[in-house]
């Protein structure tokens, strides 16, 4: 799958809609957009040089979705190729807000979301400051 980051800070990743993603009507089951958004965020972090496994093993921290506001605009279907984006909106000490979209090849939006991702310490699930190197890379 294609990955790229534009100079404006929007990261883009493509995903194909498979049979397992659709409901009986042949449309992407709504919860699968959350999966697409999660995968795009993981690829975005990887593009920023973040190894989530290392963060968990060495630093004892990770990321969790604290809030999600999702708007479903148009249903994607089997074999559609979607462009899923991640764009940072706001960076705070322990969390960040992201804008995410899933779009058809023609640019039409399937689903759009505002996602709040929090940094937590795995041991006790308490909020932790975002790693400094990550906030610097997002801001760059």
Image (cartoon, rainbow, N blue to C red):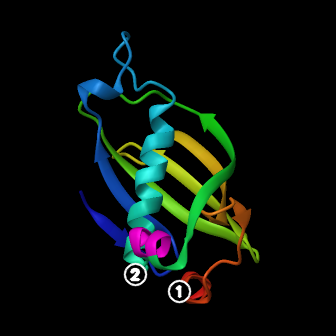
Residue 26 position, x and y percent, is 34, 16
The residue drawn where x is 23% and y is 32% is: 79
Q: How many marks?
A: 2
Q: Which residue is mark 1?
A: 137
Residue 32 position, x and y percent, is 44, 34
Q: Earlier in the sequence, mark 1 or mark 2?
A: 2
For the residue carrying disc 1, how many other residues have a C-alpha within 10 Å: few (<14), some (14-19), or many (20+)? few
Seen as rendered, the residue at the extreme top is: 24
Question: What is the secondary structure assignment of the residue under circle 2?
Answer: loop
Quadrant of the rendering where the N terminus is positioned: bottom left
Q: Is residue 53 magenta?
A: yes
Q: Which residue is mark 2?
A: 49
The residue drawn where x is 34% and y is 28% is: 21
Residue 17 location, quadrant: top left
Is residue 113 left or right of 6 when viewed as pictured? right
The residue drawn where x is 41% and y is 75% is: 54
41 and 71: which one is in front? 41
For the residue carrying disc 2, how many other residues have a C-alpha within 10 Å: few (<14), some (14-19), or many (20+)? few
55 and 79: which one is in front? 55
Residue 61 appears anywhere in the view: yes
Q: Main secondary structure of the magenta part?
A: helix
Is residue 132 shown above or below 95? below
Residue 109 appears anywhere in the view: no
The circle drawn on residue 50 is none
Question: What is the secondary structure assignment of the residue under circle 1?
Answer: helix
Nearer to us of marks 1 and 2 is 2
- Structural distance between the alpha carbons of marks 1 and 2: 9 Å
Residue 90 position, x and y percent, is 72, 71
Magenta highlight range: 51-57
Q: Are marks 1 and 2 in contact (CB under 8 Å)?
A: yes
């Amino acid at each position: 799958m294609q990955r790229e980051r534009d100079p404006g800070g929007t990261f883009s990743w493509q995903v194909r809609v498979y049979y397992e993603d659709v409901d009986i009507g042949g449309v992407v089951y709504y919860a699968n957009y959350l999966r697409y958004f999660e995968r795009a965020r993981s690829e975005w972090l990887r593009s920023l040089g973040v190894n989530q496994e290392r963060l968990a093993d060495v630093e004892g921290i990770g990321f969790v979705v604290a809030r999600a506001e999702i708007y479903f605009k148009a249903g994607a279907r089997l074999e559609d190729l979607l462009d899923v984006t991640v764009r940072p909106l706001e960076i705070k000490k322990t969390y960040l807000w992201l804008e995410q979209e899933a779009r058809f090849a023609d640019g039409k939006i399937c689903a759009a979301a505002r996602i709040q991702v929090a940094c937590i310490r795995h041991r006790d699930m308490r909020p932790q400051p975002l790693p400094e190197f990550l906030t610097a890379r997002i801001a760059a």
